[in-house]
């Protein structure tokens, strides 16, 4: 896919819904999602089976969601999902 990815400081996963970036910085997990189409769904972050972040997001095309959570997650246990299967990053 090709589309502009704005204000997300890069990306780790992208598809027809948008681009996701996840960064670990000083004990914080920073989450960015740049939408390509209208989004009205849950964004969920898991450490293994444990949910560490969950938020309903509503975005217009080319808008960016950004948030952070204080968490130490081993990158091998990290899963980020938009909806049940719109975008999944492991």
Image (tube, rainbow, N blue to C red):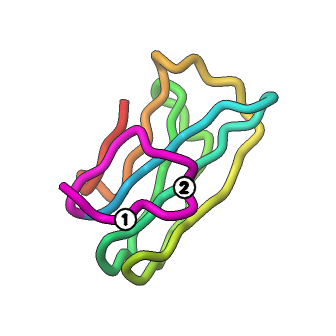
- Tell which of 30 and 49 is nearer to you: 30
Instruction: Name the residue rendered at 25%, 56% in the picture.
Output: 86
Decide: is 52 above or below 26.
below
| Residue 4 falls inside the magenta stretch | yes
Q: Which x, y percent locates residue 4?
A: 37, 65
Q: Which x, y percent locates residue 40?
A: 39, 76
Question: Callout 2: 10 Å neighbours few (<14), some, many (20+)?
Answer: some
The boundaries of the magenta stretch are: 1-16
Decide: is 5 above or below 72.
below
Q: Quadrant of the N terminus?
A: bottom left
The reply, left or right, for residue 65 in relation to residue 34 is right
Instruction: Name the residue rendered at 57%, 62% in the picture.
Output: 7
Tag of residue 8: 2
- Tell which of 9 and 55 is nearer to you: 9
- The reply to whether discs 2 and 1 touch (Cβ–Cβ < 8 Å) is no
Tag of residue 4: 1
Tag of residue 46: none
Q: Which x, y percent locates residue 84?
A: 28, 54
Q: What element carries label 1?
A: loop
């Amino acid at each position: 896919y090709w589309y502009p990815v704005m204000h997300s400081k890069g990306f780790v996963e992208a598809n027809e819904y948008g681009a996701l970036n996840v960064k670990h910085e000083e004990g914080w997990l920073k989450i960015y999602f740049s939408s390509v189409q209208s989004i009205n769904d849950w964004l969920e972050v898991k450490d293994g089976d444990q949910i560490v972040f969950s938020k309903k997001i509503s975005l217009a095309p080319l808008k960016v969601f950004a948030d952070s959570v204080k968490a130490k997650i081993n990158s091998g246990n990290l899963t980020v999902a938009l909806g049940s299967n719109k975008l999944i990053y492991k």
